[in-house]
Image: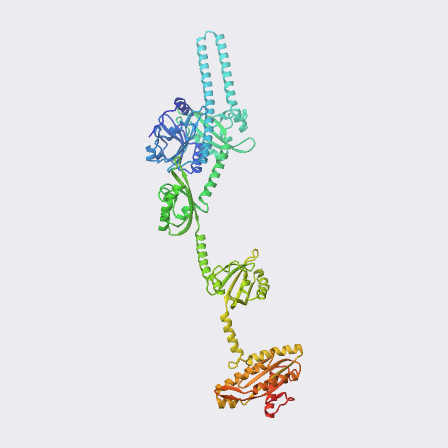
């Protein structure tokens, strides 16, 4: 440990220190307010105003320390008063001057120190304003600038007291000189008692000198800008200088009548009276602060240094007061306190956790938000625990890997951890930090910030799950998905490649024209789909498209507009070729005769209805012809049902060949068939077609195995609109006409029937 030597101006410094009566004086609000502000704004546990005399350092004001003094040999401040600027010790254990100092190795465990000398107007250092931390700390330039500002306030306080001291010393010297002169005058009067004229002359001369002295003293006092006044033991005003009279609007008539209570704000009188009552011969100096109303009616603050004068029995005789207006300082203190409170509130109640940790990973500082997340009080964690104590096993392993990297690099993050509070609540946090280092580059502490990202992490995991589900859906083998811009492929899934027979990547950037069977199909889909997708609409259709090989496929297409700005669209495509074939088979079974493949009665009635509607609009002639095979039963009986079925299939094919493309041939069942002949010019055109039918039916039918069958047909016809305008009516009319033909056994045109 290095002991600081005496200063070069030690004698003058000590003399001035004692003369200012600061040592062993009562606590004063001005000093205590400053130390509280230093502790709060610099966020240190200990702040001191230290005065260094011959053998000790005595604390005029202290925050965070119980001791009132320490030996000078141990004092950091004894070193600080040697310099012109601040003394900064980032880590006392690493500083050879202080490493084994009992104040470092034991209570109060000083680790970091910053002190600024407090000097008189002549430059004598009386002590320091200092900030002390129990943890290593690199005080920033901003910290030192703030400490210097507070030291400047104390400098003004000390110099104000110097001015008061000089005024008091001048008054006392003048009084002593006057008393000496009077004593000398009395002595001379006694010695020259025999000479009355000489005595009178001497007395008048002394009175003149006394008056001159009083005038000089009054001039000194009245020229002071500070308030100077005296009041007796009852508080009555006995003297007031010009500054006092101006400030409190006093006159000559006020002297001896007004009391100090008359100029003190009523609410402050009890506190001032209590402080003055504490004055004693051993403690004659009392500093008070109170509010008053100035001559403009404004409420202001003043500080008064009150010195009591006591008689030989210790009874108070008179109080001399030197005061000044400290409203500006009080306003500054209030502003600083308000700013400090706001800053502390911002720090403590920010929506994120702030903390600092030392090189061992222990908390040095932590705000309320972070403490709430931990479920702990500040004294339970600072210097005792670190963030890793609240991490999960995985988090602690991650911390042990990344903390050395942080010490080496000086910054890290954001890193994510699960933080488990004392009550078991787990929240996901994101941590970032930068390092504060000393002059040697060693880590003093971290500046760390934690964000609660539990909700964001939950949403992220949910999005990841949705993305996985979406990816599975997008890669479905059943549905092809493609995103288009300007009808060209921007993105597609693998199912689309497989559906159309393309290799991966082969469709990228290609126009969708290559998926359509022809230009008309491509254009038609564009005209129908894109208007339908405007304003949030969708388009859906079943489209005949082609694979890469040219093989046609049926595709169920559904599209929607993704962005009006980019014009991008999203399409879902499903190969429904198999379904279409099945649907056609089902429809064929539902609407066609299973044996011959001809339309059945259901499809016949549908087509007949459509043909009648067309005939009504066009006025064309339409015929419904009922056909019954003659001789079919004999074929069935003689050759069997298989042969009969063979014959019906052959006759059905011959009937298809006899009619036109606009006509219909249907099988109703057994050996009954119906023809619907449309757009006939006249009855003769119908006769021509039926003649072809009779001839075709009469042709021999080879059944196989050398077997041949012969059948004929009876035909009854009904015409629209002559015989009816309704499908059932026409069909019934033709059926009856056919039976009349069978009964007549001859061709009968007037009855609407023919027979071979």
77 on left or right of 740: left
652 on left or right of 232: right
Residue 134 drawn at (x, y percent) = 37, 37
Quarter of the picture containing the N terminus is top left
Residue 364: tell me if it is visible.
no
Q: Nearer the viewer, residue 368 or 392?
A: 392
How is this picture coloured? rainbow
Residue 207 drawn at (x, y percent) = 50, 14
Residue 18 quadrant? top left
Q: Nearer the viewer, residue 448 or 535?
A: 535
Residue 136 quadrant? top left
Which residue sits at x=47%, y=18%?
Answer: 174
Quarter of the picture containing the C terminus is bottom right
Number of marks in the rendered image: 0
- Rendered position, 9 above or below 390: above
Residue 747 drawn at (x, y percent) = 62, 90
């Amino acid at each position: 440990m290095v002991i600081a030597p005496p200063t070069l101006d030690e004698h003058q410094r000590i003399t001035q220190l004692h003369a200012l009566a600061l040592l062993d004086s009562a606590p004063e609000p001005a000093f205590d307010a400053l130390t509280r502000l230093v502790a709060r704004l610099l966020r240190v546990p200990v702040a001191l105003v230290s005065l260094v005399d011959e053998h000790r350092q005595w604390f005029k004001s202290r925050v965070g320390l119980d001791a009132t003094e320490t030996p000078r040999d141990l004092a950091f401040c004894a070193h600080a008063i040697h310099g012109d600027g601040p003394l900064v010790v980032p880590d006392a254990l690493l500083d050879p001057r202080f490493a084994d100092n009992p104040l470092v190795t034991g209570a109060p465990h000083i680790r970091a120190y910053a002190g600024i000398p407090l000097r008189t107007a002549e430059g004598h250092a009386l002590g320091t304003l200092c900030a002390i931390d129990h943890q290593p700390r690199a005080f920033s330039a901003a910290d030192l600038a703030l400490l210097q500002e507070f030291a400047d306030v104390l400098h003004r306080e000390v110099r104000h007291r110097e001015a008061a001291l000089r005024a008091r010393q001048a008054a006392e010297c003048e009084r002593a000189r006057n008393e000496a002169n009077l004593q000398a005058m009395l002595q001379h009067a006694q010695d020259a008692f025999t000479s009355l004229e000489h005595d009178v002359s001497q007395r008048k001369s002394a009175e003149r000198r006394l008056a001159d002295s009083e005038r000089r003293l009054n001039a000194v006092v009245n020229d002071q800008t500070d308030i100077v006044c005296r009041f007796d033991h009852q508080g009555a005003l006995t003297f007031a200088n010009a500054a006092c009279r101006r400030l409190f609007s006093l006159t000559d008539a006020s002297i001896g009548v007004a009391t100090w209570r008359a100029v003190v704000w009523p609410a402050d009188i009890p506190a001032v009276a209590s402080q003055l009552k504490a004055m004693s011969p051993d403690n004659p100096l009392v500093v008070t602060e109170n509010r008053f109303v100035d001559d403009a009616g404004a409420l202001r603050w003043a500080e008064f240094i009150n010195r009591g004068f006591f008689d030989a029995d210790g009874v108070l005789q008179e109080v001399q007061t030197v005061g000044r207006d400290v409203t500006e300082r009080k306003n500054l203190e209030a502003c600083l306190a308000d700013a400090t409170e706001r800053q502390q509130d911002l720090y403590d109640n920010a929506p994120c956790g702030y903390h600092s940790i030392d090189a061992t990973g222990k908390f040095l500082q932590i705000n309320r938000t972070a403490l709430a997340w931990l479920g702990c009080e500040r004294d339970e964690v600072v210097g005792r625990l670190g963030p890793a104590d609240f991490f999960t096993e995985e988090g602690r392993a991650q911390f042990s890997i990344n903390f050395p990297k942080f010490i080496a690099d000086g910054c890290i993050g954001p890193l994510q951890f699960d933080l488990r509070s004392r009550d078991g609540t787990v929240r996901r946090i994101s941590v970032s930090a930068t390092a504060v280092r000393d002059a040697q580059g060693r880590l003093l502490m971290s500046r760390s910030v934690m964000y609660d990202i539990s909700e964001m992490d939950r949403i992220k995991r949910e999005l990841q799950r949705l993305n996985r589900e979406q990816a599975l859906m997008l890669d479905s083998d059943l549905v092809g998905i493609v995103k288009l811009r300007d009808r060209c492929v921007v993105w597609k899934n693998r199912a689309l490649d497989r559906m159309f027979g393309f290799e991966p990547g082969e469709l990228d950037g290609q126009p969708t024209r290559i998926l359509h069977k022809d230009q008309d199909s491509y254009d038609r889909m564009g005209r129908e789909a894109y208007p339908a997708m405007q304003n949030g609409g969708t388009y859906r259709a079943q489209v005949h498209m082609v694979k890469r090989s040219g093989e046609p496929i049926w595709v169920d297409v559904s599209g929607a507009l993704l962005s009006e700005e980019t014009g991008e669209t999203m399409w879902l495509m499903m190969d429904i070729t198999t379904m279409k074939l099945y649907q056609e088979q089902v429809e064929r079974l539902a609407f066609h005769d299973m044996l011959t493949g001809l339309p059945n009665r259901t499809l016949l009635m549908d087509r007949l209805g459509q043909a009648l509607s067309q005939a009504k609009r066009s006025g064309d002639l339409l015929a419904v012809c009922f056909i019954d095979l003659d001789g079919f039963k004999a074929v069935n009986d003689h050759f069997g049902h298989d042969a009969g079925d063979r014959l019906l299939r052959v006759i059905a094919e011959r009937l298809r060949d006899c009619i036109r493309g606009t006509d219909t041939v249907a099988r109703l069942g057994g050996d009954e068939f119906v023809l619907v002949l449309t757009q006939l010019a006249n009855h003769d055109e119908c006769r021509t077609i039926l003649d072809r039918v009779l001839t075709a039916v009469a042709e021999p039918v080879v059944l196989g195995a050398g077997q041949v069958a012969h059948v004929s047909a009876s035909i009854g016809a009904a015409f629209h609109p002559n015989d009816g305008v309704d499908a059932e009516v026409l069909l019934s009319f033709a059926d009856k006409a056919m039976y009349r033909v069978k009964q007549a056994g001859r061709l009968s045109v007037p009855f609407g029937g023919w027979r071979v």
